[in-house]
Image: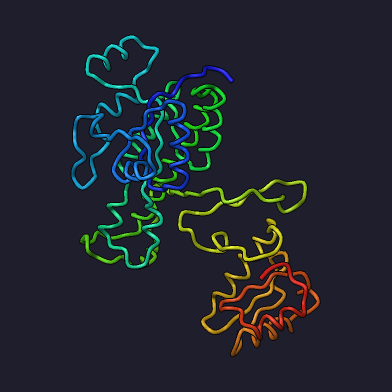
């Protein structure tokens, strides 16, 4: 590892508190001063950690219902100044700006809010993070001196490196974290732009509904945001690699929960998506049986079991080893029928 630099002060402001206290303890064990905001500071104090309020660092209180907490020169100056540039060092000293060597931020849950039933226009807008992305971008830009941590999944590796290197992080690690940070803010802004583009102007108390599709209108910029869900065993063929990404809506087969069985393959996922989408086209109980994205059979019926029997009758030989899609709960009667045939997934 090269270009090791110490972390003496960390600013923590997170929405997702998973793993936060353990990570903060690891920082404190290396002598890192913890500076934090609002709910994050409370979580850390409740865990018995010593925390300095952001308002103590800035000399300015949080205001406007939390809209202004970290948008301050003593925050961004502490992050952005280059330690190797004498003029920068002199400027921050002149204005009493303290170094911030690590920023730990994850952003307001805009996508989760947008997906909620009954959310209002005002609630959606309030969940657009401003201070968080600003700090993320500042810290990522100054990766030569500052570590930006945006993923809970990185906490353990960072803690280990700090312990190994007596409170220091390498240039390679800071650069990797910066790359992740810029990808995070890009995906976040893409999700906001894509969501708001579908909505008309509304009063804050207006409950949002599913927007109607606009025919003949195309956006000037098309924002697509995806998040890595898992690395797959292989692609369509064994010699190919593949991974599964979730789009920002968090819907569809890719966002489903696997209840049991072996790890799903690329082909399993493609077939599952195809058969579920086909079955979902119908209002009445429907079943589709797919193999290599080709329908072996599809049918509706008075029940799921009835629909399955009808679908299987279309081509019972090709259906062996296929994938079944259903637009209803699979009840005991349907499960008993399906158990007669070997299938990859339901």
In this orientation, which residue lies closer to the viewer: 113 or 99?
A: 99
Q: Position of residue 186 (x, y in %)?
A: 43, 41
Q: Position of residue 112 (x, y in %)?
A: 40, 57
Image point (52%, 22%), residue name:
166
Give 316 or 21, whichever is nearer the viewer: 21
Q: Residue at x 51, y 49 (%)?
A: 226
Residue extending farthest to the top is 86
**Count of residue discs:** 0
Residue 201 visible in image: yes
Q: Check the picture and name the quadrant holding the C terminus.
A: bottom right
Observer able to see residue 193: no
Can you name the residue that lies furthest to the right here?
317
Residue 91: give x, y in percent of width and height. Answer: 26, 14
Residue 117 percent location from the top left of the image: 36, 67
Position above or below: 135 against 124: above
The colour scheme of the drawn protein is rainbow
Where 98 sits versus 63, above or below? above
336 vs 221, left or right, is right
Q: What residue occupies the far bottom of the structure in this picture? A: 302
List the single residue furthest toward the front.
48
Q: Is residue 195 above or below residue 261?
A: above
Q: Quadrant of the N terminus?
A: top right
Image: 248 above or below 312: above
Residue toward you, 55 or 189: 55
Identify the residue at image location x=61%, y=79%: 330
């Amino acid at each position: 590892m090269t270009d090791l630099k110490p972390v003496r002060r960390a600013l923590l402001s997170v929405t997702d508190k998973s793993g936060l206290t353990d990570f903060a303890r690891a920082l404190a064990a290396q002598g890192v001063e913890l500076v934090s905001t609002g709910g994050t500071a409370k979580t850390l104090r409740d865990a018995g950690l010593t925390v300095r309020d952001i308002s103590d660092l800035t000399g300015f209180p949080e205001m406007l219902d939390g809209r202004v907490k970290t948008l301050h020169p003593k925050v961004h100056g502490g992050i952005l100044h280059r330690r190797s540039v004498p003029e920068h060092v002199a400027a921050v000293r002149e204005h009493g700006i303290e170094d911030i060597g690590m920023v730990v931020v994850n952003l307001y849950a805009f996508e989760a809010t947008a997906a909620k039933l009954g959310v209002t226009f005002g609630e959606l807008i309030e969940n657009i993070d401003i201070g968080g992305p600003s700090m993320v971008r500042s810290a990522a830009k100054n990766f030569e001196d500052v570590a930006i941590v945006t993923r809970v999944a990185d906490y353990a590796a960072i803690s280990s490196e700090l312990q190994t290197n007596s409170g220091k992080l390498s240039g390679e690690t800071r650069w990797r974290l910066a790359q992740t940070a810029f990808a995070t803010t890009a995906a976040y802004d893409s999700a906001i732009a894509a969501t708001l583009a579908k909505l008309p102007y509304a009063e804050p108390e207006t409950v949002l509904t599913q927007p109607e599709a606009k025919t003949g209108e195309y956006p000037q910029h098309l924002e697509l945001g995806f998040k890595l869900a898992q690395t797959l065993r292989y692609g369509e063929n064994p010699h190919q690699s593949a991974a599964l990404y979730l789009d920002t809506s968090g819907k569809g087969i890719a966002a489903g929960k696997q209840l049991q069985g072996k790890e799903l393959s690329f082909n399993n996922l493609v077939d599952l998506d195809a058969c579920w989408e086909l079955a979902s086209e119908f209002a009445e109980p429907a079943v589709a049986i797919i193999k290599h994205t080709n329908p072996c059979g599809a049918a509706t019926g008075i029940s799921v079991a009835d629909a399955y029997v009808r679908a299987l009758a279309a081509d019972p030989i090709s259906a062996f080893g296929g994938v079944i899609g259903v637009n209803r709960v699979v009840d005991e009667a349907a499960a008993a029928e399906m158990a007669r045939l070997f299938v990859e997934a339901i």
